Image (cartoon, rainbow, N blue to C red):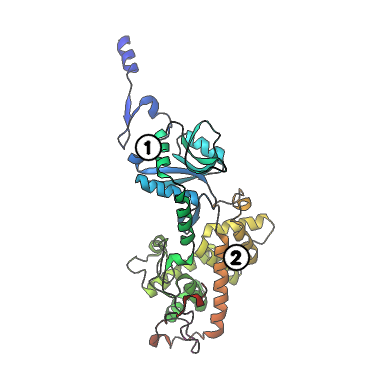
């Protein structure tokens, strides 16, 4: 009986993973990194990096940053999806890679750690490179065969395009349909009908709409934002707006008004109504949680977290690692200059609309938007 028990104990138990790999009992109980075959079989590549403009940051619900976009291309080459795990520093990245919590460090590491296998994108002048686990030679070889220095230039060019206004497919219409009659757009009656849902002046919502789409109901951004008010599909679903109706002017404006009202409710601590509108506009463009991070930084540094003039300074500073890596900041890097510029342009156009538009609804039915003759005339 004793011999039989010993024999059973000496038999190697095997565990079969969902993607078809067989692991020994000793392997199954230890957290290890996936091999290249495991990664492909599981359909996911896990990237470890640090938040920042060159590495990874969230931009309107999409990942951006040179290292992320490169790794995204590599994952596409493998035929798998990409998951990002953010770390606070390089020590955490290396430890998590060793523990099997990630497959690849997409960050320019100094080539000094003997526990790592360096491969892929590199900066020879700085002696830095991406890294994988020492035992994952197949992944390192595949990464080296895929990468070429020209990819960096291509990705930088693509990122520059995506972050420009050119990445929004739209016709550019005049910012005023009929100045002499005080008609802003073909959709004034919808702004007048739905802006009160958010307790907004309809001309402010019209100014925002022009900034978003230049009054083109078919506008589409690379990130997937659609229609007059550039509503993301996920936001549309949350608001009860179907993708089949998202280009309908009335339904798009109505959904946007509902979203503005929701954002206004989340800024009830900003008691001044006009100030609150600036916070709402900033959140619509740059994200609610980034704005909250800037408010927290403002308060920490002795400013007024409910003053747009104070908070906008820290929205700008969220592109500086001294600030976006502050422990009080929960959502990292932000392209703050874009958001502050967005709010400023809407404020300026709103002031112009207030000086011309009378608020009547009797003119829209006989006019259609006039195509701008020269695109560069209208600054977006």
Locate residue 244: give its quadrant. Answer: bottom left
Q: Which residue is mark 1?
A: 36
Residue 104 horizontal side relative to residue 124, left or right: left
311 is within the stretch colored magenta = no
- Residue 80 visible? The answer is no
Q: Is residue 370 above or below residue 50?
A: below
Nearest to the observer: residue 63 or residue 2: 63
Q: Residue at x 31, y 14 (%)?
A: 7
Q: Position of residue 131 (x, y in %)?
A: 48, 38
Q: Residue at x 47, y 47 (%)?
A: 149
Mark 2 and 1 residues: CB-CB less than 8 Å, in contact?
no
| Segment colored magenta | 174-184
Say what secondary structure mark 1 lies in: helix
Residue 206 horizontal side relative to residue 319, left or right: left
Tell me if mark 1 has few (under 14), some (14-19) or many (20+) residues whose alpha carbon lies within 10 angstroms of its own: some
Q: Which label sits in the foreground, 2 or 1?
A: 1
Q: Which residue is mark 2?
A: 270
């Amino acid at each position: 009986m004793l011999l039989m028990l010993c024999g059973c104990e000496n038999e190697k138990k095997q565990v079969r993973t969902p993607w078809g790999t067989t692991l020994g009992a000793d392997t199954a109980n230890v957290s290890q990194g996936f091999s290249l075959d495991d990664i492909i079989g599981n359909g996911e590549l896990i990237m470890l990096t640090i938040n920042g403009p060159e590495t990874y940051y969230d931009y309107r619900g999409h990942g951006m940053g040179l290292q992320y976009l490169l790794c995204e291309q590599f994952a596409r080459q493998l035929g798998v999806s990409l998951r990002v795990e953010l770390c606070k520093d390089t020590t955490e990245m290396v430890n998590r890679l060793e523990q099997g919590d990630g497959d690849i460090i997409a960050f320019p590491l100094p080539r000094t750690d003997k526990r790592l296998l360096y491969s892929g994108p590199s900066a020879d002048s700085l002696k830095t490179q991406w890294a994988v686990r020492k035992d994952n030679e197949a992944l390192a070889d595949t990464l080296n065969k895929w990468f070429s220095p020209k990819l960096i230039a291509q990705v930088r060019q693509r990122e520059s395009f995506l972050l420009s206004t050119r990445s929004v497919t739209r016709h550019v219409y005049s910012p005023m349909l009929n100045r002499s009659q005080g008609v802003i757009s073909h959709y004034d009656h919808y702004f007048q009908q739905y802006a009160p849902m958010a307790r907004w002046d309809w001309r402010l919502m019209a100014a925002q709409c022009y900034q978003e789409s230049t009054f083109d109901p078919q506008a589409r951004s690379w990130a997937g934002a659609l229609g007059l008010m550039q509503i993301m599909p996920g936001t549309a679903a949350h608001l009860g707006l179907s993708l089949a109706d998202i280009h309908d002017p009335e339904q798009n404006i109505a959904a946007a008004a509902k979203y503005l009202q929701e954002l206004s409710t989340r800024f009830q601590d900003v008691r001044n109504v006009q100030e609150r509108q600036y916070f709402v506009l900033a959140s619509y463009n740059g994200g609610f949680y980034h704005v909250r991070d800037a408010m927290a930084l403002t308060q920490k540094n002795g400013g007024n977290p409910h003053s747009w003039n104070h908070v906008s300074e820290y929205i700008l500073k969220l592109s500086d690692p001294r600030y976006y890596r502050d422990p009080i900041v929960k959502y990292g890097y932000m392209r703050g200059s874009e958001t502050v510029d967005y709010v400023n342009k809407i404020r300026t156009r709103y002031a112009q609309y207030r000086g011309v538009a009378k608020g009547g609804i009797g003119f829209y039915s006989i006019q259609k938007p006039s195509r701008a003759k020269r695109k560069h005339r209208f600054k977006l």
